[in-house]
Image (tube, rainbow, N blue to C red):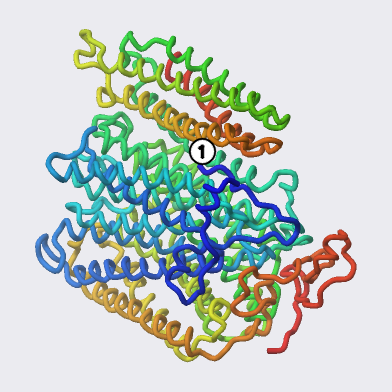
């Protein structure tokens, strides 16, 4: 997810850029990251020096990818300007926003497939018998708290957008920090919940309830984990925006925040589906 | 922008003769050429694997005999399928689209040029990742459909198999980034007056392709992420013990897999439509119906996937329903095929290389389509599933599509390079290709009782398989003629004008060959039915009166005869 490039408007004959070194570096970083991750089996790296090499590839790849993504976002780059165009049916939506919508549409299918997979295996196992696969320690409360945390953070993003539009830098930074804090709280709460479930004891689950315990634990951890990864990506973007906002960016230019807000609201809405599916039904 | 930011800026675009240019360029034409070139590399990669497979099949062999051992054979077959479908076919189409679509719609570039470069590099590195997988024990060896539970570590423990799955994930990232870019560009950056109805047919097929890609690959991504998690973290979705795990994979995979057939085929259809129009000098018959049929197919493609699952435990009622939707989806295709045939009938055909390839593609697609009907019928599928009938059918469809795209390379070659390819060698390529193709795949229909995926078969079928192997080598060597022709012509071919084809009618033929970096001097405009170039003052004044002189017919308008 890259925030939109900031176009440098210099009147009408604006210079258009045709070169950037960052795309190839981002892709090379992604290559190293995945190659490194391929050395993982059953949750840990393979033994011996090979494992160390894979770990090194994973870490260096992640650093390269993230660094190049940040550099690419900060690079001044003038994309093509749309001045004389037929745009039905999206005349009112500018390019970056439409791009974000389209991306989110594909993300809807991604989560749809995960939820569909969950429903499919649950029906195959028996919808009610499913409860026998879940320990009593798996209670709705942590999920409920997380629902409120995310809803509140969606609200603080809206405040940030309004603050940017009304050019109030302190409110902007404050509401972005609030969003970040609420997101981190969401992840910490989730980590505590998972730690607890990993180590439950009892006759039914003598070895705890982790990813490999049964199909119910697998669907729970993976689906909410995918959502958690979306939250984490959102937090990285928030961190980036806090950095820029504290140096005076976005004043009177609320579009980047609005586009991020679309993503963040989407992540919020996904949770509103996951919570009942994985905590209540 | 702070100073820190400007230090991150990349200097001006280097000259096209320097190597550096090709690493930093974000221009759609450069990226298009990179895509086309890279996809041809993967054609050779996947093609060599196919020739290994065909050599192994020269006679029916026991495991351990012949060129390839059992695991090597399984890897060769799997990698051949994956490389051809993912790393060759779509990227070739996307490469042509990268170059041609902005020119056809009157845009200076794609909406997000850096993301366009990013999707190319993600594609290239995903292919390299696939290559690395061969050096990590073994690559993925469970067939291109990657069925569960064979795809989990219990049965396929090699790290290389995980890397193959990751290569597909990285490829999906490339597709998603590219899809967002093309959708935004085509919906938001068409020249004024270029309504969707008037949009050139190649751009139409790309628009529908990228929409299908966006949704279909998201479903594939879900399947791949779940599989990665099963392989890396030990989740149990596809484990043998999982209730419905094997069936779940087929649902996820084929929900992607059927639209994928059209994702691969639609750009070929677009090339066919363009080339037929140019080389018959006639607008396609029933243009609006043609577009409507394509839109219908694109939507329907998401509701037929279970015809790949007639041999699973899904109920007969559901199978029958999906047989009906499958027959339903063949109807719009009939319309398109007849529109193409009538265009030929009414036009004045010029048999140049691009036309020959595209006419060949139509013939092959008709054969592939008819033989597919057998597989779409539940009862017949019980018999044909898992045999070479399936192999022959989908190669007629998929490689039939390739045929049109190869024609597309010849068609746009003068635009890409400013030089003409050698027509005689082009025709030699077509002759070898067409004969080789049919010699390779037609015997598979005859020898349909051969079981798919394994290299032992009834020895009475050996003559047919030997014919196929000969055809495979002929088909493969025909590409040597193409590579030689294109390489030599790119430097030493006859110089090509802006529009070397007499009846070409789309906007890419109104600018020089190759086009300038930013495509157009003025502002392309279709508000009066034909393409004009407006100057800045006119656009500024928001008037549609006086404008540039260069005129060509909009694709939807009347054709204009042009000299030279
Ligand atoms: Cu299908």
* Left or right of residue B31, residue B460 in this image: left
- Against A203, is B15 above or below? below
Q: Nearer the viewer, residue B30 or A221?
A: B30
Residue A233 percent across, percent down from the top left? 46, 34
In the image, residue B481 sits, relative to residue B250, either above or below, namely below
Q: Is residue B325 visible?
A: no
Report helix, strand or loop for mark 1: helix
Quadrant the C terminus of chain B occupies: bottom right
Q: In front here: B524 or B197?
A: B524
State how many labels appear. Answer: 1
Q: Residue A187 is drawn in which quadrant? A: top left
Label 1 sits on residue: A107
Tell me where residue A73 appears, x and y as whole percent. 53, 46
Note whether B289 is above or below B340 in the view shown. Answer: above
* Residue closest to the far front: B3
Disc 1 sits on a residue from what chain?
A: A
How packed mark 1 is, by other alpha carbons closer than 10 Å (few <14, some 14-19, many 20 or more), is many
Residue sitting at x 42%, y 45%: A67
- The quadrant where residue B485 appears: bottom left
Instruction: Indicate left or right for A233 with B181 as reference.
Output: left
Q: Is residue B554 above or below residue B214?
A: below
The location of residue B115, given as percent across then percent down, is: 52, 53
In the rendering, at what x and y percent does residue B191 appear? 73, 62
Q: Nearer the viewer, residue B359 or B212?
A: B212
Q: Residue visible at 24% across and 61% down?
A: B76
Disc 1 beta carbon < 8 A from ligand 1?
A: no
Residue A79, visible in the rendered structure: yes
Give residue B252's quadrant in the image. top left
Rendered residue at 35%/25% (across/down) = A221
């Amino acid at each position: 997810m890259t925030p939109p490039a900031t176009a440098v408007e210099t009147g009408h004959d604006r210079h258009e850029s045709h070169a950037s070194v960052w795309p190839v570096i981002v892709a090379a970083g992604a290559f190293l990251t995945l190659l490194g991750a391929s050395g993982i089996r059953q949750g840990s790296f393979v033994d011996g020096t090979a494992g160390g090499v894979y770990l090194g590839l994973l870490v260096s790849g992640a650093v390269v990818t993230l660094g190049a993504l940040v550099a690419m976002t900060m690079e001044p780059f003038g994309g093509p300007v749309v001045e004389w165009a037929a745009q039905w049916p999206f005349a009112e939506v500018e390019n970056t926003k439409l791009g974000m919508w389209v991306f989110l549409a594909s993300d809807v299918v991604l989560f749809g497939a995960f939820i569909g997979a969950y429903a499919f295996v649950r029906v195959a196992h028996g919808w009610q018998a499913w409860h026998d696969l879940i320990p009593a320690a798996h209670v709705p409360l942590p999920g409920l708290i997380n629902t409120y945390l995310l809803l509140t953070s969606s609200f603080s993003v809206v405040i940030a957008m309004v603050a940017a539009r009304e050019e109030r830098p302190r409110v902007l930074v404050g509401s972005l920090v609030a969003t970040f804090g609420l997101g981190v709280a969401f992840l910490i709460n989730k980590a505590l919940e998972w730690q607890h479930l990993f180590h439950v004891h009892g006759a039914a689950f003598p070895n705890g309830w982790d990813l490999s315990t049964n199909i119910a634990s697998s669907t729970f951890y993976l689906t909410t984990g995918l959502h958690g990864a979306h939250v984490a990506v959102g937090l990285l973007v928030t961190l980036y925006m806090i950095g820029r906002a504290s140096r005076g960016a976005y004043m009177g230019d609320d579009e980047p925040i609005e586009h991020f807000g679309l993503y963040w609201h989407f992540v919020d809405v996904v949770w509103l589906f996951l919570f009942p599916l994985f905590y209540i039904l | 922008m702070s100073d820190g930011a400007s230090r991150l800026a990349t200097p001006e675009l280097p000259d096209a003769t320097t190597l550096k240019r090709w690493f930093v360029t974000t221009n759609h034409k450069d990226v298009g050429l990179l895509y086309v070139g890279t996809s041809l590399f993967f054609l050779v990669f996947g093609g060599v694997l196919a020739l290994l497979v065909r050599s192994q099949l020269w006679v029916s062999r026991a495991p351990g005999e012949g060129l390839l051992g059992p695991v090597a054979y399984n890897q060769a077959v799997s990698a051949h399928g994956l490389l051809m479908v993912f790393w060759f076919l779509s990227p070739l189409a996307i490469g042509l689209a990268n170059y041609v679509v902005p020119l056809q719609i009157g845009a200076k570039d794609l909406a997000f040029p850096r993301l366009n470069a990013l999707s190319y590099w993600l594609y290239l590195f995903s292919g390299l990742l696939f290559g690395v997988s061969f050096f990590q024990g073994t690559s993925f060896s469970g067939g291109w459909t990657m069925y569960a539970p064979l795809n989990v570590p219990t049965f396929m423990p090699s790290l290389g198999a995980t890397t193959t799955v990751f290569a597909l994930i990285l490829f999906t990232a490339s597709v998603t980034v590219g899809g967002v870019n093309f959708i935004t560009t085509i919906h938001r950056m068409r020249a004024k007056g270029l309504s969707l109805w008037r949009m050139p047919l190649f751009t139409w097929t790309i628009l529908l392709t990228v929409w299908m890609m966006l949704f279909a690959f998201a479903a594939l991504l879900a399947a791949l992420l779940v599989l990665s998690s099963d392989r890396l973290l030990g989740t149990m979705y596809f484990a043998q013990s999982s209730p419905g795990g094997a069936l779940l994979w087929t649902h996820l995979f084929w929900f992607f897999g059927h639209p994928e057939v059209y994702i691969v085929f639609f750009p070929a259809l677009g090339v066919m439509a363009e080339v037929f129009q140019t080389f018959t000098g006639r607008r396609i018959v029933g243009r609006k119906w043609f577009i409507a049929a394509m839109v219908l197919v694109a939507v329907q493609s998401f509701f037929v996937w279970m015809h790949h699952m007639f041999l699973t435990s899904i109920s007969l009622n559901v199978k029958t329903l999906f047989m009906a939707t499958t027959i339903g989806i063949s109807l719009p295709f009939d319309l398109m095929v007849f529109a193409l045939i009538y265009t030929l009938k009414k036009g004045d055909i010029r048999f140049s290389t691009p036309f020959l390839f595209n006419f060949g593609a139509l013939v092959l697609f008709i054969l592939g389509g008819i033989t597919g009907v057998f597989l779409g019928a539940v009862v017949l599928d019980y018999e044909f599933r898992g045999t070479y009938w399936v192999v022959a059918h989908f190669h007629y469809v998929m490689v039939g599509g390739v045929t049109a795209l190869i024609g597309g390379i010849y068609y746009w070659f003068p635009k890409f390079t400013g030089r003409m390819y050698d027509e005689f060698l082009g025709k030699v390529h077509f002759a070898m290709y067409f004969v080789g193709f049919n010699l390779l795949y037609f015997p598979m229909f005859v020898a349909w009782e051969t079981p798919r995926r394994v290299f032992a078969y009834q020895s009475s079928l050996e003559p047919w398989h030997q014919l196929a192997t000969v055809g495979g080598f002929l088909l493969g060597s025909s590409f040597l003629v193409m590579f030689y022709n294109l390489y030599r012509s790119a430097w030493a071919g006859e110089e090509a004008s802006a529009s070397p084809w007499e009846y070409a009618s789309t906007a890419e033929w109104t600018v020089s060959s190759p086009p300038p970096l930013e495509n157009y001097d003025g502002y392309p405009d279709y508000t009066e039915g034909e393409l004009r170039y407006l100057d800045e003052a006119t656009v500024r004044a928001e008037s549609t009166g006086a404008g540039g002189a260069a005129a060509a017919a909009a694709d939807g308008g009347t054709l204009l005869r042009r000299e030279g």
